[in-house]
Amino acid sequence: MTDSDTARLDDYRFQMGHDAGNLAMALDQLTDAITALNQHTVYYRLEQGQRKAPPPDLVPLIAVLADAKKLVQDSLLRLKGKE
């Protein structure tokens, strides 16, 4: 991780506790990855000037990341409810 990521992780751990802070950081990273992939799909073109569906090789990856993000969100909400 970069120095700024490490500092952000430390902030999350301070604010939420160790486990919830780790989940919050993972959630941020998953969100960033999904955003980058979706941005790629916006600019991906099969023919000049025409937007097409997301590249077939990225569709399963986007789905896996979205499912992982949902699991992290659910875990984070459960941890927050226990405190």
Image: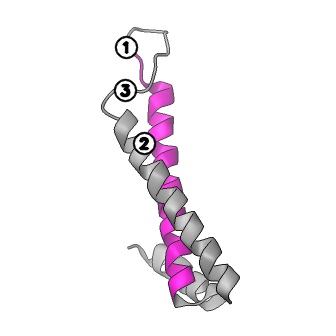
* Quadrant assignment for the N terminus: bottom left
Q: Residue at x 61, y 91 (%)?
A: 14
Where is mark 2, residue-wise?
62
Is residue 38 covered in magenta? yes
Graded by Cα atoms within 10 Å as few (under 14), some (14 to 19) or many (20 or more), the crowding at tag 3 reads some
The earlier-in-sequence mark between 1 and 2 is 1
Q: Amino acid at mark 2?
A: Ile
Q: Amino acid at mark 1?
A: Leu
Where is mark 1, residue-wise?
46
Graded by Cα atoms within 10 Å as few (under 14), some (14 to 19) or many (20 or more), the crowding at tag 2 reads some
The earlier-in-sequence mark between 3 and 1 is 1
Query: Residue 23: x, y in percent?
Result: 51, 74
Asked if the residues shown at circle 3 and circle 1 are in contact, with their CB atoms under 8 angstroms apart, the answer is no
Magenta part of the chain: 19-46
The answer to whether 59 is drawn above or below residue 46 in the figure is: below
Q: Residue at x 53, y 55 (%)?
A: 31
Query: Residue 36: x, y in percent?
Result: 47, 45
* Quadrant assignment for the C terminus: bottom right
Query: Residue 70: x, y in percent?
Result: 54, 57
Determine whether the residue tagged by mark 1 lies in a helix, strand or loop.
loop
Taking depth in this image into account, of 57 and 10 the one nearest to the observer is 57
The answer to whether 55 is drawn above or below residue 8 in the figure is: above
Q: Amino acid at mark 3?
A: Pro
The earlier-in-sequence mark between 3 and 2 is 3
